């Protein structure tokens, strides 16, 4: 077994945190994975993985070696793509990440259009509500909401979103429309545990920051559930404007306290900008940036012009 293949096996075991899971990912048998790791440790002369009957984790030497493996394999992949002409022709595997709901509503439709236009590219879309480390997880392009990029990365702003408080018109007709954020203490509130807005909501009052503690009567695990409860008239919630744009347009939800909202958050397409950028990344970034930049729900200025 060559060393590059051993590195791929070791990388799979470390990322999947198990031999069986790594074998499924590599489409091989668990014994062959075990033999590869044993051969690697014997050749290097040190233990890379600490194993018990219930768990597996990297040793200190294993953690350092994992970082080296990722770098070496990335350089090998880059060399092969360069030799194959991927810097002039979009081809190969592309990994993209975005927040779950934003990815489902806005990124997924663009993926299909892009793949139809560039048939030599395959895409893996990682839709998660966490900030993915692009280098560690091999991500080529990320959609980020907020100022969330690192040195060496290029960020292209494609829109912005607001943090909005909303409820159904029926709920507001019955309980009244709050005129100040302090009135939220009297409201029935549903919020998501995946949000950072579970215990307090931030506003701006007379150009000064204002923090309002909230006591949600209902905490759910996903924003969609909180939005549905608000749409059904149960209470109020606070989410990002893109998440309720369709419901607001349909009259199912009404946004309140708009004059107290903090500054909008930028939507950015982020990618590594070091050396030559493969054609698959350049074309996808251009394609995605153009599509998102044309969406009126993400660009209020466009809506006003229309």
Image (cartoon, rainbow, N blue to C red):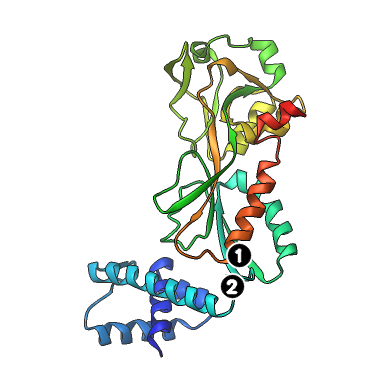
Question: Where is residue 4 shown, x and y percent of the image?
Answer: 41, 82
Which quarter of the rendering shows the C terminus? top right
Q: Mark 2 falls on what kind of element? A: loop
Depicted 265 relative to depicted 261: above or below: below
The reply to whether callout 1 and callout 2 are in contact (CB within 8 Å) is yes
Q: Residue 51: in sight, yes or no?
A: no
User: Badge 1 local density, few (<14 within 10 Å), some, or many (20+)?
Assistant: many
Question: Where is residue 18 shown, x and y percent of the image?
Answer: 40, 71
Question: Where is residue 56 shown, x and y percent of the image?
Answer: 33, 68
Q: Mark 1 falls on what kind of element? A: helix
In the depicted view, which residue is nearer to us: 2 or 226? 2
Comes first in the chain, label 1 or label 2 = 2
User: Badge 2 local density, few (<14 within 10 Å), some, or many (20+)?
Assistant: some
Q: Residue at x 25, y 83 (%)?
A: 44
Q: Residue at x 64, y 29 (%)?
A: 229
How far is disc 1 from disc 2 in space, using C-alphas?
7 Å
Q: Is residue 156 left or right of residue 298?
A: left
Q: Residue 32: in sight, yes or no?
A: yes
Depicted 106 relative to depicted 121: above or below: above
Question: Where is residue 236 shown, x and y percent of the image?
Answer: 59, 22
Depicted 115 relative to depicted 144: above or below: below
Residue behind mark 1? 280
Q: Is residue 114 left or right of residue 274?
A: right
Residue behind mark 2? 86
Q: Is residue 63 left or right of residue 208?
A: left
Which quarter of the rendering shows the N terminus? bottom left
Depicted 199 relative to depicted 143: above or below: above
In the depicted view, which residue is nearer to us: 217 or 49? 49
């Amino acid at each position: 077994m060559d060393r590059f293949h051993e590195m791929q096996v070791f990388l799979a075991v470390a990322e999947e945190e198990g031999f069986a899971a790594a074998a499924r990912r590599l489409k091989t048998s668990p014994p062959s994975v075990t033999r590869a790791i044993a051969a690697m440790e014997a050749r290097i002369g040190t233990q890379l993985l600490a194993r018990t009957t219930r768990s597996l984790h990297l040793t200190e030497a294993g953690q350092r070696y994992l970082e080296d493996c990722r770098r070496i394999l990335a350089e090998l992949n880059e060399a092969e793509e360069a030799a194959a002409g991927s810097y002039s022709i979009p081809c190969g595997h592309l990994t993209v990440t975005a927040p779950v709901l934003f990815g489902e509503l806005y990124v997924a439709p663009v993926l299909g259009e892009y793949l139809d236009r560039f048939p030599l590219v395959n895409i893996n879309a990682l839709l998660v509500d966490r900030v993915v480390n692009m280098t560690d997880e091999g991500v080529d392009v990320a959609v980020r909401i907020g100022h969330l990029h690192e040195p060496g990365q290029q960020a292209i702003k494609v829109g912005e979103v607001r943090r909005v408080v909303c409820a159904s018109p029926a709920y507001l007709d019955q309980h009244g429309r709050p005129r100040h954020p302090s009135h939220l203490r009297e409201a029935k509130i549903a919020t998501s545990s995946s949000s950072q807005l579970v215990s307090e909501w931030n506003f701006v009052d007379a150009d000064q920051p204002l923090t309002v503690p909230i006591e949600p009567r209902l905490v759910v695990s996903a924003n969609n559930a909180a939005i549905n409860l608000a749409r059904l008239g149960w209470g109020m919630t606070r989410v990002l404007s893109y998440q309720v744009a369709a419901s607001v347009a349909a009259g199912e939800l009404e946004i309140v306290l708009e004059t107290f909202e903090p500054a909008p958050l930028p939507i950015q397409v982020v990618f590594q900008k070091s050396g030559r950028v493969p054609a698959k990344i350049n074309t996808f970034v251009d394609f995605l940036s153009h599509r998102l930049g044309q969406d009126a729900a993400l660009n209020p200025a466009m809506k006003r012009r229309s």
